[in-house]
Amino acid sequence: MSSGLNTRAIHAGQEFDPTTGAVVPPIYQTSTFVQDGVGGLRGGYEYGRSGNPTRDSLQTLLGALEGGSIGTAFASGLAAEDALLRAVLRPGDHIVLGNDVYGGTHRLIARILGPWGVEVDAVEMSDKDAVRAALRPGVTKILWVETPSNPLMKITDIAALAEIGKEAGAIVVVDNTFASPALQRPLELGADVVVHSTTKYLGGHSDALGGAVITNDEEIGEKVRFHQFAAGAILAPMEAWLTVRGIKTLGVRMDRHSSNAAAVAEHFADHPRIERVYYPGLPTHPGHELAARQMSGFGGMLSLALKDGEQAARTFVESTKLFQLAESLGGVESLIGYPAEMTHASVRGTPLEVAPDIVRLSVGIEDVEDLLADLEQALPRS
Ligand SMILES: *Cc1c(COP(=O)(O)O)cnc(C)c1O
């Protein structure tokens, strides 16, 4: 489609209801569909696991946003990842991923697919030689990239890794949850597959879990679709509708998330209580230039290392009022988290462990002066 991202976000897959003219397509909250005689399906719909018009409208929309020909929606981000992995992997296959990949992704691969015979190596993704060395041609089936990463916002060069992965015969997968297609489109940079937790920025309102796999590779896309149908981790109609509703404002939300996060990052860049700010929008961030090249904005996520260490970090996350202490990210409301014991508890004792002085902020779209005042009042004074 040649129209711009904001136009696609509002119109792709969203034709008005032909029966009533309703501008917003209805929620098809149904498990099955009446047949006009045996096998006489209306619009191809038979049973809610194999197809539902509300889910289809979201799948079309997701494909259009990422520039992919086939999008498939699941009950959560991890359900989407699981479907993709089991659709393309066989026992004995090998995966290379980043050493700061989303903890749940590592857990899924190591603890669910591991016993099933899949091997995994976690490497430093900014070190291209390390990635090349970890890839085993013919055995490594997937090179898994997540950028910006969680929680240190490391930036990985998608185009370079897509080339390196393809040379080794691996499928290059990018988890685009943190950037969203409003800021970064991995398929255009050479990746084979994009995965999302739509729970985060795509849905954007912290009211629906969901996940997606998007690709231009028809073979992979069809395998993932078959997995969705045959294993059944589908996205429910209400969740699909809420996600479509959220996506309509993706562009304006990401603009505000990015400008608010930039203001927070700048505020704390030279702050006496803060050791370090991790935000790709700061020129001092090691991935700044790369981010400026491959993203159209720096996003709403940042992390802070507190000078006074673990106790200060714990006190800080329990003292904010607007920033609510919760897992997850990407909603309109600001959230604060303590990765070492929350999002990254599952990777403690592994190379993916997060330092105890780090706090993570999902900067929402509230008034930035209020957000800054909240963070300042919560900083422990020594
Ligand atoms: C949340 C998240 C996931 C998992 O998604 P769920 O919807 O929670 O299952 C995967 N990747 C990233 C980067 C995430 O933030």
Image (spheres, rainbow, N blue to C red):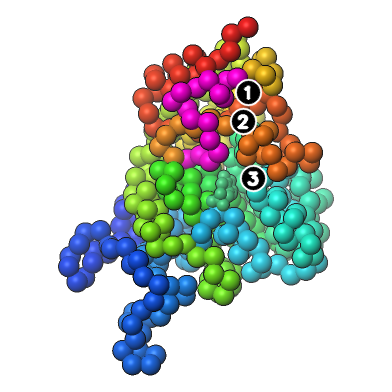
Q: The magenta stretch spans which residues?
A: 313-330
Mark 3 or 2, closer to the camera: 2
Closest to the camera, between mark 3 and mark 1, is: 1
Kindly identify which numbered label has been placed on residue 102: 3
| Ligand 1 is within 8 Å of the C-beta of the residue at disc 3 | yes
Q: Please tell me whether residue 70 is drawn above or below residue 341 in the rendered image.
A: below
Residue 161 falls within the magenta-colored stretch: no
Q: Residue at x 40, y 53 (%)?
A: 243
Query: Is mark 1 in CB contact (under 8 Å) with mark 2?
Result: yes
Q: Position of residue 277 (x, y in %)?
A: 60, 23
Q: Nearer the viewer, residue 131 or 210?
A: 210
- Left/right placement of residue 114 relative to residue 44 reads right
Residue located beneath label 2 in the image = 338
Determine the residue positioned at 47% across, 75% down. 50
Q: Earlier in the sequence, mark 3 or mark 2?
A: 3
How far across and down, in percent of the image, does residue 315 sit? 60, 19
Residue farthest bottom in this picture:
38
63 shown above or below 278: below
At label 1, which amino acid type do we have? Arg
Q: Quick check: is 317 in the magenta stretch?
A: yes
For this orientation, the residue located farthest to the left is: 20
Residue at x-position 57% and y-position 60%: 80
Q: Under tag 2, what secondary structure?
A: loop
Main structural element of the magenta stretch: helix, strand or loop? loop
